[in-house]
Amino acid sequence: MNKKEALECISNGEYESVPKEFYKDKSFVLEAVKLDVDGNALYYADQSFRKDKTIILEAVIQNGIALSYADESLKKDKSFVLKAIKLDEGGIALEYADESLQKDPDIIQATKNR
């Protein structure tokens, strides 16, 4: 399977059809999360990408559920969570932020201002 075919699988929601080595390639994962409307590509991606702010934010643009796959350190990072909430058109990223931030006044205001 080549990269183009693997990305087609992602866009069709066929995550398990993609060979694991693709999920270790940063450029592939970045492209995959941009195509992934379900927000699940990060589940299959190498664990190291769960700390990558660029990849997580790109995934959140497609679907806020992607924040659920982010590393705990990012879910606790107020400035990162604010960015994620502003990018999440569906409005569900807040559910996956650290509990301590879910009641933060700045975070709540950001969700209202989306």
Image: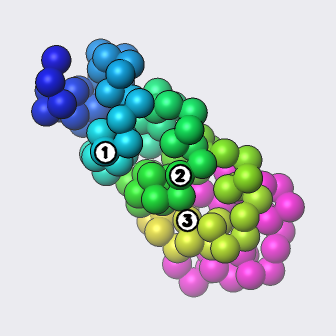
Q: Secondary structure at mark 2?
A: loop
Q: Nearer the viewer, mark 2 or mark 3?
A: 2
Give coordinates of residue 89: x percent, y percent.
Answer: 45, 65
The mark nearer the N terminus, 2 or 3, is 2
Give the mark nearer the N terminus: 3 vs 1: 1
The reply to whether residue 58 is visible in this rendering is yes
Distance of label 3 from label 1 (alpha carbons): 21 Å
Disc 3 target residue: 84
Disc 2 packing (10 Å; few <14; some 14–19; many ≥20): some
Q: Which mark is residue 107?
A: none
Q: Residue at x 72, y 64 (%)?
A: 77
Q: Amino acid at mark 2?
A: Asp
Left or right, 67 with reference to 31: right
Report how far apart the C-alphas of labels 2 and 3 lie in the structure.
13 Å
Is 111 within the magenta? yes
Q: For mark 2, what is the residue?
A: 52
Residue 16 picture quarter = top left
Give me the residue at 39% from left, 29% from top. Answer: 23
Q: Which residues are magenta?
A: 93-114
Asked which secondary structure carries label 3, the reply is helix
Other-residue count near label 3 (Cα within 10 Å), few / some / many at <14 / 14–19 / ≥20: many
Earlier-in-chain disc, 1 versus 2: 1
